[in-house]
Image: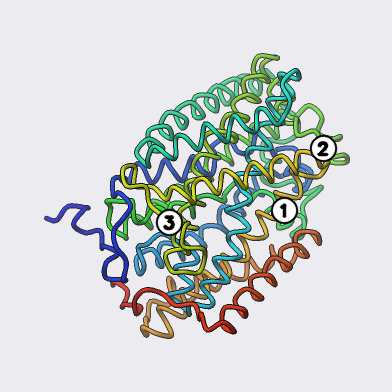
Amino acid sequence: MSSPQSEAPGVERFGYQQELRRSLSFADLLIYGLIFMVPIAPFGIFGSVFQSSGGMVALAYVIGMVAMAFTALSYAQMARAFPMAGSVYTYAGRGIAAPVGFLAGWVILLDYVLVPSLLYLVASAAMTSFVPGVPIWVWLIAFIVLNTVVNYLGIEMTARMNKIMLVAELIVLAIFLVVGVVALAQGKGHGAALSPLFDSSTFSWPLAFGAVSVAVLSFLGFDGISMLAEESRESSRRLGRSMVFALALAGALFVVQTWVAALLAPNRADLLTKGDPAGTAFYDTAEYAGGHWLSVLTAVATAVAWGFANSLVAQAATSRLLFAMARDRQLPAFLGKVHPKHRVPVNATFLVAGVSLVLGLYMSSRDDGITLLGTLVNFGAMTAFLALHVSVVVHYVVRNRSRDWWRHLVAPAIGFLILLYVVINASIAAQVLGFVWLAIGVVILAGSYMMGRRPTLSAVTPEANE
């Protein structure tokens, strides 16, 4: 029997050299995806989802998980066909055409480049609320420097830190759930037991799907696993499975924790009418359930999870996207440089750190900085995912005459329609800025054609592994 290492197709057949180090196992990929999504992500946006879903927080996450499941299936199919770094850029470029790949990569850059800045800003603001004597920019710089050092030292170091942080997050989550269930048993709950899943007094389909556009932000990250395709020692099939598994596990954790929190929320009426502008609804709920210590524990855990663990893997994923586009000469070549010892895209890693610092400092000066970054990240990811679903249909059904109608036509079509609904109903500001970003990409692409530099990939698209 062949080992996973021998089953993992090399990138040489696609016209590239294997420069990154293949060292990640299935467990490493799964943990990476979970850390990217953050098992306790709902802590930070619980109040916003509560208001937008009419109190049916668990329902919003269930619908969000189902919606993202179709996207995960499409990722799994394209990862089998093209087991390389680059995610949607690679899949759309090779599955449809190189120019489409450039635009897909450009759009998802809006997600990946902004995600670290958003995470650093949220975490720094949280830490400043606990230690007001330390300015937010100090925390911002500290988080960025720490993560950059870890990512610079190699993907193995990042993987080890992921394991430690995942265990810590799961311990905090377990403590909250135990205390929360005890509080419910003591009669501290509000409303019917099933109200977080369905409340006839507030339910409507527009409301439910509107909440999904907020809740889906928590699921962004499972796709980051695809960025590590050239550092995985697993087969391309198992790479795809790791994305689906990570999504399912994270979804289950999101539903359970928000169900308990929704039943315990002490200020339900205020949350429904006024929302949670301070972002403290979950911590207030934790204090109501178990005391001030639990409020502090969950808040600090959120800050560390977003500012270190999640930002760490976000920076790693973004640098791999820049690396993939640079080696195809669709971004400056210096971003394709790999460190000879640590085998990481070193210049891309430092660029992500610099962009995160500049954007983070600027957005920290705006009252709507976190909200604006969040909506832009969401819009960029959803738009790029649309291209992903199209690439599955074009590559498998149109080019390769696949008759696996479910995986290669029906599932991508359902995923496309769900995401299209989310994009259409996104905030006006996100739509405007998102399409401006896309327009800039179109101008750059047109300029490349005018200069005789038509986007090309390194090799002719091979047949997918069936």
User: In x, y percent, where is residue 180?
Assistant: 62, 24
Residue furthest to the left:
1
Side (left or right) of 392 relative to 200: left
Amino acid type, callout 2? Pro
Q: Residue at x 27, y 70 (%)?
A: 13
Which is more N-terminal, label 3 or label 1?
A: 3
Q: Is residue 378 above or below residue 54?
A: below
Question: Which amino acid does the dot numbered 1 rest on?
Answer: Thr
Residue corresponding to mark 3: 226
Disc 2 versus disc 3: nearer the observer:
3
Residue visible at 49% across and 72% down in the picture:
92
Q: CA distance from mark 1 to mark 3?
A: 23 Å
Looking at the rendered structure, the secondary structure element under dot 3 is helix
What is the number of the mark on residue 375? 1
Dot placed on the residue nearer the N-terminal end, 2 or 1? 2
State the quadrant of the C terminus.
Answer: bottom left
Up-down: is 418 above or below 41?
below
- The residue tagged 2 is 277
**Which amino acid lies under the numbered mark 3 shown in the image of this protein?**
Ser
When the figure is inspected, residue 347 is found, relative to residue 292, above or below; the finding is below
